[in-house]
Image (cartoon, rainbow, N blue to C red):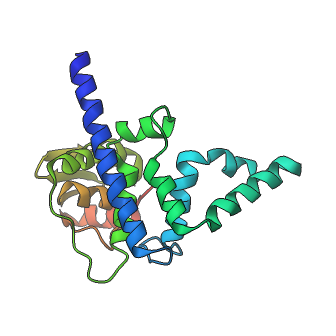
């Protein structure tokens, strides 16, 4: 059993390295002013979010403190946000470190944060196309769907998510209808987190399910 677990850990680490490198390359190529699909955010805002999430959580809290501690936290946030773009990208490329709780959480979630935010950046430009299927990335995205869908979706309908890797059914207490949502794993991950404008999925459902979809919400 331990050998299986270590193999899975290695696979997760390999995916993190691949996806992190791909996202870092996108940041470097597109530059800080590149648009994203996130309202009001450009690439610089997205990179700042990832940086603070991975290695600056203390700065998020510290910036609200009074006195010298708060001032130092705000100055450090400003220093990071105004550093040379290549330096900022390189810090992200290095990652949060092997003992980071954020790194462990991401491996458990199938690297959902990196997968989603890479698409937030990629799909902010005109003429984007989905990336070619990749078996390891697809498995990770499908795993992330299973973990995130129950948390991200608040729809009074029974929803079945269907991908080439299988199906997942989410029952809703007091369901007013039903829906079936078909797509590739990464597209379904984007859909369950509310990225309707770019998620390439096909939705089938009865009238009650469609009303519930309109009235409900998705996202964290």
Q: Image point 14% across, 58% down: which residue? A: 133
The quarter of the picture where the N terminus appears is: top left
What x and y, as percent, mark residue 96? 49, 43
Q: Quadrant of residue 117?
A: bottom left
Between residue 48 and residue 28, name the one nearer to us.
28
Q: In the visual, does 101 lie left or right of 189?
A: right
Please say if 24 is above or below 38: above
Q: Image point 87% across, 49% down: which residue? A: 68
Between residue 18 and residue 62, name the one nearer to us.
18
Q: Image point 26% across, 77% down: which residue? A: 128
What x and y, as percent, mark residue 144? 31, 45
| Residue at the top extreme, as displayed | 1
Between residue 94 and residue 110, name the one nearer to us.
94
Instruction: Confirm whether residue 177 shows in the render.
Output: no
Q: Quadrant of residue 205?
A: bottom left
The total of numbered circles placed on residues is 0
| Residue at the left extreme, as displayed | 164
Instruction: Confirm whether residue 144 shows in the render.
Output: yes
Q: In the visual, does 182 lie left or right of 47?
A: left
What x and y, as percent, mark residue 32? 50, 73
Q: Image point 53% across, 61% down: which residue? A: 87
What x and y, as percent, mark residue 91? 51, 53
| Residue at the bottom extreme, as displayed | 126
């Amino acid at each position: 059993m331990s050998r299986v677990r270590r193999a899975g850990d290695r696979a997760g680490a390999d995916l993190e390295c691949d996806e992190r490198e791909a996202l870092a390359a996108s940041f470097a190529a597109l530059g800080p002013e590149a648009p994203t699909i996130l309202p009001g955010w450009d690439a610089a805002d997205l990179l700042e979010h990832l940086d603070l999430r991975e290695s600056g959580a203390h700065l998020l809290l510290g910036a609200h403190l009074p006195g010298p501690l708060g001032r130092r936290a705000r100055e450090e946030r400003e220093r990071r946000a105004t550093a040379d773009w290549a330096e900022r990208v390189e810090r992200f490329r290095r990652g949060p470190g092997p003992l980071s709780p954020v790194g462990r959480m991401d491996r458990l979630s199938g690297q959902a944060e990196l997968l989603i935010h890479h698409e937030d950046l990629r799909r902010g430009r005109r003429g984007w196309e989905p990336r070619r299927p990749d078996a390891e990335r697809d498995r990770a995205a499908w795993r992330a769907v299973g973990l995130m869908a129950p948390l991200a979706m608040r729809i009074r309908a029974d929803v079945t998510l269907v991908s080439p890797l299988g199906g997942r059914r989410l029952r809703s207490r007091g369901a007013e209808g039903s829906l079936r949502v078909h797509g590739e794993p990464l597209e379904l991950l984007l859909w369950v987190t509310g990225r309707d404008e770019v998620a390439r999925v096909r939705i089938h459902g009865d009238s009650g399910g469609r009303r519930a979809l309109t009235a409900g919400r998705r996202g964290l």
